[in-house]
Amino acid sequence: MVQVILLSLLPVLLGLAVPADEAPSADGAQIWKLSENVEPDPLDLGEMVARADSDRNLEAAFTYRLLAANRLLAFDLQPCASRLLLGIPEEEDYPKAREVIAQVTLYLEQASGKLGELDSQSGLDEYKRYRYGVQLETLQAFSKALRELWLQASIPDEQRRKNIADATVALGVILESDDPAIVRAATLWQAYLFASIDKLQRALDLLPTALKPVPEGKPVSFYARVLRCRYIAQLHEDCAVSVSLLLRMKSRCGLWFEDEERAQTAQQVVKLITRRLCEDSLARANPDRKEFNEWCAGVASRIDGEFSEICKSGPVELLSLGSPVPMIIEVTPSVSLEKNSAKPEPAASPAPAEPQS
């Protein structure tokens, strides 16, 4: 009886019937809101690419195309990627993401061509050729992986699974990077892709343990722990362990995030995922587990009450993923692109100085 009452009240409380993704509140407004995204410094990359081409500066033409692709992946996909991982995508996310990734693919294809020209004409030294090649390969791997997240449903399942397998291989290569930010992002997306083709154990083997401290309050690392809880529940078709872990994670957000506001938005993420796991469990509840069903219903009901209270004054604010791909290409905006000027140098990848997960 508890289960029936709870499930019947959920749509009334939060509009979370089907799906919870685009749930309106009582006044028809969206009830979920992402915390502020990271914004890039103003930089007209299109103009810089055009100027580099007109000046016949091959190194600048290569570098700015890499930078343009990197910025699109890091900043333009932030809200789409956050909502995808949280299970609350919006309809416009799909065409938006596909448009961004199409532009990224074009920039990277052009950059690859420019690198070939640059090497044949200028005779790049071995270190620079290696460094440029690694940067290009890294962005290509992320682009290939993220493209699979927003593919149209019309693609045959067999082809989609093959594409995803190829993308996980590309991410596997860059997992060996000495840049912790690259490793964190590659781990997250490789795990997500494995889970999308029902390889949940492979995904769990990659992800950090749920209660391991989040290094320096990195949202990508936090999301990896949330995903782990989801996948444990999916693998075992039982949410008991996952919900218990999530409840403990919620109490630790204040330790993981120094900023109180970020800690609160992280707690809302935990509550959202907890509530969804409880709802899924109740939908297929085993009548022989009456005590567990009642506990699960109580957890979900308490979260619904908290969300409903928040919605009286505005949307529930959720911690954003931040950049789904880290910025690995840095070029000073003031770099001159005159024909005889010094050529811009991409910044070298930082040395590892922090935990990777």
Image: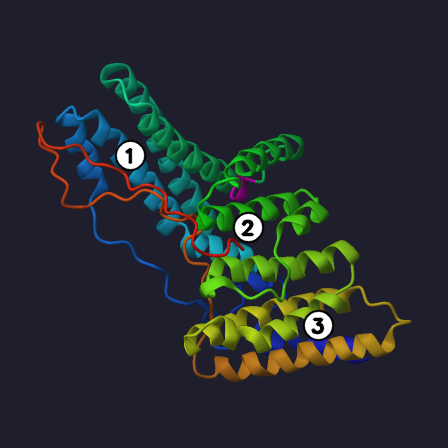
Is mark 1 in CB contact (under 8 Å) with mark 2? no
> 158 or 59, which is in the foreground?
59
Question: Magenta residues?
Answer: 148-152
Q: Residues within 10 Å of mark 1 (few under 14, many from 20)?
A: many
| Of the image marks 1 and 2, the number of the one nearer the N terminus | 1
Q: How far apart are the two marked residues, 3 and 1, measured between alpha carbons?
A: 46 Å
> 172 or 159, which is in the foreground?
172
Residue pointed to by mark 2: 188
Location of the C terminus by quadrant is: bottom right
| Of the image marks 3 and 2, the number of the one nearer the N terminus | 2
Query: Which amino acid is tagged 1?
Result: Arg
Relative to 120, is 100 on the left or the right? Answer: right
Tell me: residue 124, above or below residue 226: above
Q: Is residue 90 visible?
A: no
Q: Position of residue 246 (x, y in %)?
A: 64, 70
| Of the image marks 3 and 1, the number of the one nearer the N terminus | 1
Numbered label attached to residue 244: 3
Q: Main secondary structure of the magenta part?
A: loop
Tell me: residue 194, above or below residue 10: above
> 348 or 8, which is in the foreground?
348
